[in-house]
Image (cartoon, coloured by chain):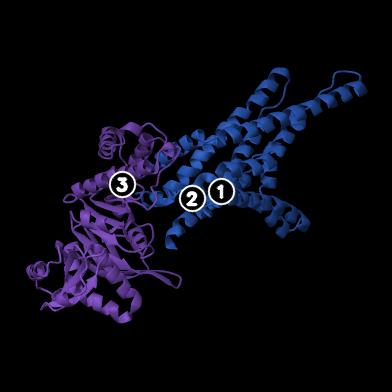
Chain colours: A blue, B purple
Amino acid sequence: MTPVQAIIAKELRVYFVSPIVYVVGAVFLLIFGLLSYLYVGFAGAQAIQLMQMQGGPAQINLNDLVFRNLFASMRIVLVIILPILTMRLFAEERKLRTFEFLLTSPLRVTDIVVGKFVSVFVIYLGLVGLTTLVPTVLMLFSDFDWNPIWTGYLGMVLLGALFLSVGLFASAVTENQIVAAFVSFGMLLTIWLIAGLGSLFGDTTAGHVISYVSYMEHYERLVRGLIDTSDLVYFGSGLVLMLFLTHRVVESTSWK
Amino acid sequence: MIDVHNITKRYGHHTAIDRVTFSVAKGEVLAFLGPNGAGKTTTMRILTCFMPATEGTARVAGFDCTDHPLEVKRQIGYLPETPPVYQELTVTEYLTFVGQLRGMAGPTLTSALDQSIGRLELGAVRHRLIGNLSRGYRQRVGLAQALLHDPPVLILDEPTVGLDPKQIIEIRELIKSLAGSHSVILSTHILPEATAVCQRVVIINKGRIVAEDTPEQLSARLRQSEKVSLTLKSRPADCESKLQAIPGVLQVLPGQGGGTFLIECELGRDLRDELARVAVMNQWGLLELRTVSMTLEDVFLQLTRHEDHSTEATEATVSMSSPENQDR
């Protein structure tokens, strides 16, 4: 077992012994289920309206009415929930003084950062995996196109990875878990609002550049079913940047 | 094995350690002694590559702490001030994790695990969550972590804190048994611990080394007079003046309790038989007569007070620790 694998195994173990995963997981799945139920309910109501107007069976598009809305709503859920999942990663180590132990073990800082990120990402993937139950059940009762759903899920995975890396960074800068959660929450919300700032500039170069920084348009395209290389590059480089910054923060503790 | 040369660590304008130089030979146990905030932990953190020194060089097993931190970390078993344990893991899980971080696996890991659990008598709690263990057990789990990979160099920051008296003795025995095969640095502010376990003591105060020697040599060097404690049945009025009159007696100080005196004599003179003769002749009722040796505690207080009160004192103690002045 390499040191990275050892760290991943230990982090997963700690996550499942403590109540965080169960609480966060339950809330995440509950909200996903509830939102799905609501959007399916709205779609049903619209179908009935259409039926009354047309007088015959109505065709409704579940992709547009349910899944697009569902994935779009998950943004705010992820902004609120993921910082709770990441807040302990470094802050707890600092608080319990195990941070010194990690840094005096024969490990590279990269091993620590990657190990911690992968462990929380695995948990997130598990939670996202469980939500596929919703389209699977809906498939039994109706017909829809799976392709935009897969790209929507890809979007949710990439967006989640980016959020988790921001949370990891926030956790590395403080030894207080509440502060860590709040810092990542603030950062994620700020990056969200940058999209609004971009639209103020309209169709100008500055406007495009500013909008590009926000994850909004990149995620929206994936939810709509478009896979664009520039979006993948955005999520990939954002993730690498945040992990790099985390690396620097962890490393710099020893300079002080 | 450990070579520290002129290391200085500054936090902004505050100098935590100032030009500290010392070395530890293979198999030697060295105590780092000093009041809280003297710079013990900072020195240990530099040696374990947790933080770099502002100036100077530190080498462990031939590897420089700044240039080859990974190599240095492999040679060291480190117990920080607070035992670095994860409360959500059991003792076995935790030690397995520590072993895996050090690249151990399979039978090597299993045997190392059993050995360190046996050494620190953790067998009874090995499947319990560390979060549910007492402070003493956690400290022992921390020690087991440092010993797991049988490192040539052990750095222990206050290893007996939080243990009960029986455990303290056991841990001291364990550290003594490591001498010879391991180089050990342990920090402590408990003086008998240093006397009990270590071959050499480094006394550090306000970031500077004020003395470095064996515990016995240290007390011998700082002794300016022989001291004898004399206990009499009662306290006759004239006894002090009569004692003072004995040739060679420098000072007679009243000790604790009614008939006890502390008598300072000239260096190198044993006046016990003379004192006994005077006491018996005067029928004072002699109960006890013994020489008082200087404890490490006295040495420590003398040295650290020295430092606090005058700047010249620093030079005096520094020159005191150089070999040509040993007869002082």
Q: Is residue B55 visible?
A: no
* Labels 2 and 1: the sequence-earlier one: 2
Measured from the top left, where is residue B208 in percent x and y?
31, 70
What residue would you read off at disc 2? A95
B5 lies left or right of A166: left
Please state, as top left, top right, bottom left or bottom right, where the C terminus of chain B lies in the image. Answer: bottom left
Amino acid tagged 3:
Ala
Marks 2/1: CA–CA distance: 9 Å
B304 lies left or right of B220: right
Relative to residue A8, is residue B196 depicted above or below?
A: below
Amino acid tagged 1:
Gln
User: Quick one: SS at disc 3?
Assistant: helix
Label 2 with label 1: CB-CB less than 8 Å: yes
Q: Chain of mark 1?
A: A
Label 3 with label 2: CB-CB less than 8 Å: no
What residue would you read off at disc 3? B146
Q: Which mark is residue A177?
A: 1
Marks 3/2: CA–CA distance: 20 Å
